[in-house]
Image (cartoon, helix red, strand yellow):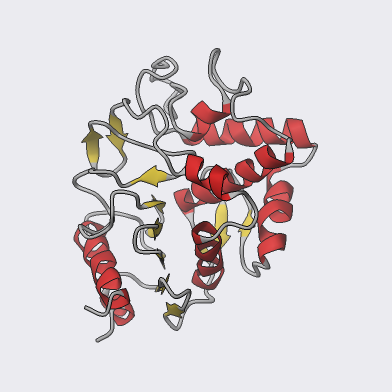
């Protein structure tokens, strides 16, 4: 059984996966064109659109946005203090890493105000059209409202490995720890000290437990979604991987995803 065939054994109704190796070659399962709900895998895609807007001069990372004292950078890095639960009080800017979908909704409003385009249209014009994506769209919240396929996300992975829409320097900044001292909870995996994050990208670092594999480098960046989806790039291995399912993230995924990622890396390295 090949590593991609493992996905057919997962306890889900539908699943698709693929990877890109250091030579730029891709492999994918039979359902690679099937469109899935991405849930929070939307966040790094929308963050990339925000970075395009920054390079175009539409936005600045350090312009005010969100709570008093916060900026676009803080919203991208989940360090503005915004919480999704209205009962939870703001922690204050740069006090804790509070994972916030509300913060990404705020980013959508900021981008719309600056560009004159709704977030879905900007998403299409800044990401979908230039990359030639055929099944990707933002149909709801900038935090969790995108749909896509493995085929399209393999194109995105190629872009993240060798950026063309933004400069390599901007991507390096986006995948470097922002406010690296902040502790916080990684959804599904508990408190992390520190809980490092880039600009819309969750960073592997030395977090444990984690949804990527034990052989993923500390420089791995990506995201997972509540709809049973994940995407990562490991720049040390010049590789990327995506898996999409239609089963909500839960205990079933906790042992399977890291094992799958490790076996993908082993297959890429010919081990």
Please state which of residues 139 and 100 is positioned toward the viewer in this rendering. 100
User: Is 162 situated above or below 170?
Assistant: below
Percent coordinates x, y for residue 62 in the rendering: 59, 24
Please state which of residues 58 and 46 is positioned toward the viewer in this rendering. 58
Percent coordinates x, y for residue 211 in the rendering: 27, 53
Percent coordinates x, y for residue 218 in the rendering: 29, 49
Please state which of residues 2 and 112 is positioned toward the viewer in this rendering. 2
Q: In the picture, which quadrant includes the N terminus?
A: bottom left
Residue drawn at (58%, 28%) of the image = 72
User: Is 207 situated above or below 161?
Assistant: above
Res 95 → quadrant = top left
User: Is 66 situated above or below 260?
Assistant: above
Res 21 → quadrant = bottom left
User: Is 82 situated above or below 53?
Assistant: above
Q: Residue furthest right?
A: 116
Answer whether residue 37 is visible to the viewer in this image: no
Residue 270 as seen in the image, left or right of residue 88: left
């Amino acid at each position: 059984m090949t590593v991609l065939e493992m996905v057919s054994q997962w306890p889900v109704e539908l699943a698709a996966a693929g990877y890109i190796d250091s030579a730029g070659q891709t492999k994918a399962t039979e359902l690679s064109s099937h469109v899935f709900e991405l849930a929070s895998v939307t966040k790094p895609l929308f963050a990339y659109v925000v970075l395009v807007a920054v390079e175009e001069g539409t936005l600045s990372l350090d312009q005010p946005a969100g709570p008093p004292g916060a900026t676009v950078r803080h919203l991208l890095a989940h360090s503005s203090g915004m919480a999704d639960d209205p009962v939870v009080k703001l922690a204050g800017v740069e006090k804790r890493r509070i994972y916030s979908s509300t913060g990404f909704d705020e980013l959508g409003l900021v981008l719309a105000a600056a560009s004159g385009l709704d977030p879905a249209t900007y998403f299409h014009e800044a990401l979908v059209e230039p990359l030639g994506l055929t099944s990707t769209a933002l149909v709801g919240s900038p935090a969790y409202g995108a749909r896509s396929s493995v085929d399209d996300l393999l194109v995105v992975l190629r872009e993240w490995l060798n950026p063309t829409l933004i400069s390599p320097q901007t991507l390096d900044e986006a995948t470097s720890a922002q406010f690296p001292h902040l502790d916080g909870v990684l959804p599904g995996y508990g408190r992390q000290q520190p809980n490092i994050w880039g600009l819309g990208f969750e960073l592997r670092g030395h977090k444990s437990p984690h949804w990527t594999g034990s052989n993923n480098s500390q420089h791995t960046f990506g995201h997972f979604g509540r709809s049973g989806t994940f995407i990562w790039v490991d720049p040390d291995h010049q590789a990327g991987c995506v898996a999409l399912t239609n089963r909500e993230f839960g205990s079933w995924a906790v042992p399977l995803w890291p094992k799958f990622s490790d076996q993908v890396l082993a297959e890429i390295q010919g081990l």
